[in-house]
Image (tube, rainbow, N blue to C red):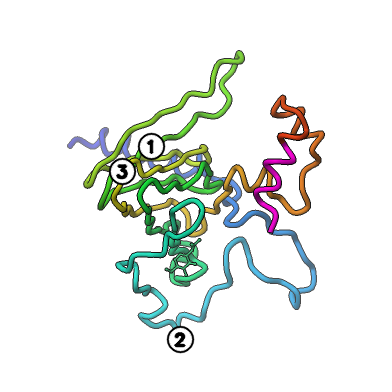
Amino acid sequence: MGTPFLITIATMALLSSLAIASDPSPLQDFCVAINDPKNAVFVNGKICKDPKVVNANDFFFQGLNVPRNTANRQGSNVTAVNVNNLAGLNTLGVSLARLDFAPYGLNPPHTHPRATEVLFVLEGTLNVGFVTSNPPNNMKNQLFTKTLNPGDVFVFPEGLIHFQFNVAKTNAVAFAGFGSQNPGVITIANAVFGSDPLISADVLAKAFQVDKKVIDLLEAQFLK
Ligand SMILES: *[C@@H]1O[C@H](CO)[C@@H](O)[C@H](O)[C@H]1NC(C)=O
C-alpha cells in the first residue's frame, strides 16, 4: 500500500465522519421537551445507570428457549427482548425477538418504525413478505414474498409493512434481530381500526372506498 492510497483512505474516512453530522434518530415515538427535570422520563432513550454499579445481569436475559402460548386469535406470540426488558441494550442499536406460531398462525401485517428486521426460521414453514412504500407515478406498492424453511433468513427493510404466516400444520419458531434498541411495532389493522379513540368512520370509509357499515364491522373486531 503506497502513501497516496493511505491518504485517500484517511480523507474518505474524514469525509464520511463529517457527512453523518446530524441530530440522532429518535429512540421512541416522541420525546417532548420539558424544562423541569422533576417530570423528565427519558433522554431520547433511557437515562444511563452509573457504570460503577452496573453488573453482568444488566446485560442478561433468559428464557428465550421456552415456547410461548399461541392460543389466541392470530395463533402467534412475539416475545420481544429490547431495552424495556434488557436494560444493557440502551444506546447500542440492536434488539431481538422470538416468534412462536401455531399451525396456520399469523403475525399480522405490521411495521417497525425504527428498525430493519432480519428473521431466521428455526422450525416450520413461514410465508413472509413486505410491501414497498408508495412509488412515484401511481405505480403499485410492490410485494416481495417468499416461503421460508428451517435455516432460512429474510430481511424486512426499516419501516415497511410486513407479515409472517405459518402455512403448515405444524408449529413454527423463528428469531428476529432488529437494528434498534426499541424498534416499535405498528400492527396495521389495530392502529387503523382499533385506535383509542376510533378514527372517524367517515375518514376510513373514504380511505378504503367502502360503505361505513364495513368500517363498523372492522372496528367491532377490536372493541374490548
Ligand atoms: C404469549 O405467551 C406468554 C407465555 O406463554 C403468555 O403469558 C402471553 O399471554 C402470550 N401472549 C399472547 C398474545 O397470547
Quarter that holds the N terminus: top left
Is ligand 1 less than 8 Å from the beta carbon at label 2? no
Sequence order check, earlier mark of 2 and 3: 2
Q: Is residue 162 above or below residue 177?
A: above
Residue drawn at x 61%, y 61% as measured from the top left: 44
Q: Which residues are magenta?
A: 215-224
Residue 62 in the image: x percent, y percent? 35, 74
The residue to which callout 3 is attached is: 168
Residue drawn at x 76%, y 28% as measured from the top left: 211
The residue to which callout 1 is attached is: 12
Tell me, yes or no, whether the highlighted magenta stretch contains residue 218. yes
- Secondary structure character of the magenta stretch overall: helix
1 and 2 marks in contact (CB < 8 Å): no
Q: Is residue 172 left or right of residue 140?
A: left
**Amino acid, disc 2:** Val
Gap between marks 2 and 3 measured at Cα:
48 Å
- Residue 53 is marked as 2
Q: Nearer the viewer, mark 1 or mark 2?
A: 2
